Image: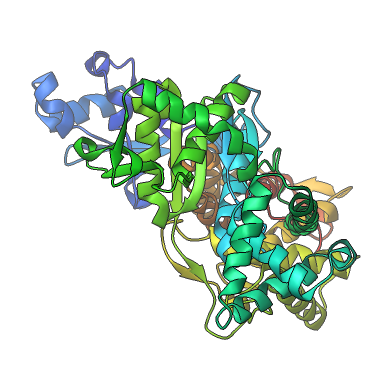
Amino acid sequence: MDLRSIVFDSIKNIEILKDVDNLFDLLKFNADVSNGDIALPCFALAKTLRQNPMVIADNVVANCTGDVFEKVENVNGYVNFFLNKKVVFNLVVDNIETKEKEKNGKTVFVDFSSLNLAKYMHIGHLSTTVIGSVISNIYEFLGYTVKRLNYVGDYGTPFGKMITAIKRWGNEDDIEKLGVDYVQGLYVKFNVECENDESLITDARNWSLKIENNESEAKRIYDKIISVSITEAKRLCDILQIYFDSWRGEAYYNDKMQPVIDELKEKGLLKTSEGAQIVDLEEHKLGACMIVKSDGGSLYATRDLATAIDRYDTYKFDLGIYVTSVQQNLHFARWFKVLELMGKDYAKNLKHVSYGTYSLPTGKIGSRFGKQALVKDMLDLSINKAREIITTRGTKTEDVEKLSKDIGIGAIKFGVLKTERLKDCVFDLEASLNFDGETSPYIQYTYARCNSIVNKCKGMDVFGKEDDIDNIDTFEIVKHLNSFEKTIIDSATDYEPCYISRYLLNLCSLFNKFYNNYRIIDENRVNNYRLRLVEKVKEVLKTGLNLLGINAPEMM
């Protein structure tokens, strides 16, 4: 319920306002509640109604009736509506919806994470993986059928390099026995050794060609590398509690690109440029989209076109969302336009959701395999640090390990989610595990506090009166709770998880102020009106954390 609708329903039949088409949109929330909760600026009506704004405002004030208003006043042509806190409390608190909506019959796919199976999952994968997962959760909450797709990198020269390294210095049988660490170690060795031995690059290209041609030995070793790499990637995603409906990668689309190229030719969209095949997008100010390289090789755009076509055939999606870095904006703009020129109506329903860089303070977390910090190392460090903090604090919990994971993993996710996705950010582990800052542990702790209060109140005698909720602190929480659904919808519309993160932080701040100022339990009796508020805050915090993919611990 939008609180403006309470005002709108109460004034829409006032004679002077009956024919105002945009009346609801004119109602504005007041930043300063001393001027009322909602205002109607009558200057916007003066021209339409051909009356002085002060006269219009006086007319509205004189005809406002009903118990939803404490007071209505005209201040210099603004009608300020002061809502009745007790009436609004009862209207709002019991009607805030925190359950997943009924299915609306629409399908969304979210393409995110896109792990490169030739490498460990590193910090560069965190933003796409976490943001994509939250966007999926939000759309699912709003009633969409969501398909979570991990378009993995399982194709190309890196796998030729791995096979070359295994043949030179390793043993094929050890791939499955020793797993991805073994493969990665040899891959790093290859990259070091090839600086002084050019034959390694030649061998790698040859093995890559053999993989493409499905030669038995190359395919056998390749399949083993993919198997251990997928197993490790799924293990890390399981720890992050992020799941996918499909792990179909680049290799799957190898035989699906030629029909796309043929269709582009048939529709007269392909041109030859310096031996390469391109779609000229100059008139759309997008340069050229290369489809086939001069050596006959395909490119990402070709594969992306084939992928989108296959996904529409498979899912008949209403919206397709790609979560990748801001550096790929031009790439997506180009192939989206090519798909549109091909006459695919669903091209207009594809959205590229980009994000800025996510990094660590220099030298804080080193990688055993290359320069970028590994997600597995970040998780271990964060969980261990969380365990140390809760042990030092003497935190009440029945399961230290589970709580350590809930806090540690939540802190890493929230590091991605608390700022606007297009902003570059540096993840500071120490700050992210602070129980008192703008952090996920702060939200989790507030949830656990609410849960503790609710549990403690079970079986207690009830006291209190309706006047106990007639105060600004309570009403600010009520208004904030009332904006929860709108926040989720805005987050979906703008593909912006940080709206929910900020909402939860603000709710915690408002609640903790209320908790410090008002007595909920008094001599083994519970104030029933205030308890209702605590229960609703708890419910909304849990739903919000779940949308962010962060667990809500019952005790902290």
Please, is residue 171 above or below residue 215 in the view?
below
**Residue 20's x, y, as percent?**
24, 18
Residue in view at x 60 percent, y 54 percent: 130
Is residue 29 or residue 392 the one in the foreground? 392
Residue in view at x 55 percent, y 72 percent: 427
Q: Quadrant of the C terminus?
A: bottom right
Please, is residue 314 above or below residue 527 in the view?
above
Is residue 103 or residue 252 the one in the foreground? 252
**Residue 456's x, y, as percent?**
84, 56
**Corner quadrant of residue 239:** bottom right
Count how many numbered circles sit on residues in the image.
0
Is residue 431 something that shows in the picture? yes
Is residue 118 something that shows in the picture? no
**Corner quadrant of residue 157:** bottom right
Residue in view at x 80 percent, y 58 percent: 228
Q: How is the image coloured?
A: rainbow
**Corner quadrant of residue 423:** bottom left
Q: Residue furthest bottom?
A: 363
Residue in view at x 53 percent, y 81 percent: 361
Please, is residue 490 above or below residue 182 in the view?
above
Is residue 104 or residue 157 the one in the foreground? 157
**Residue 283's x, y, as percent?**
19, 36
**Residue 242's x, y, as percent?**
71, 50
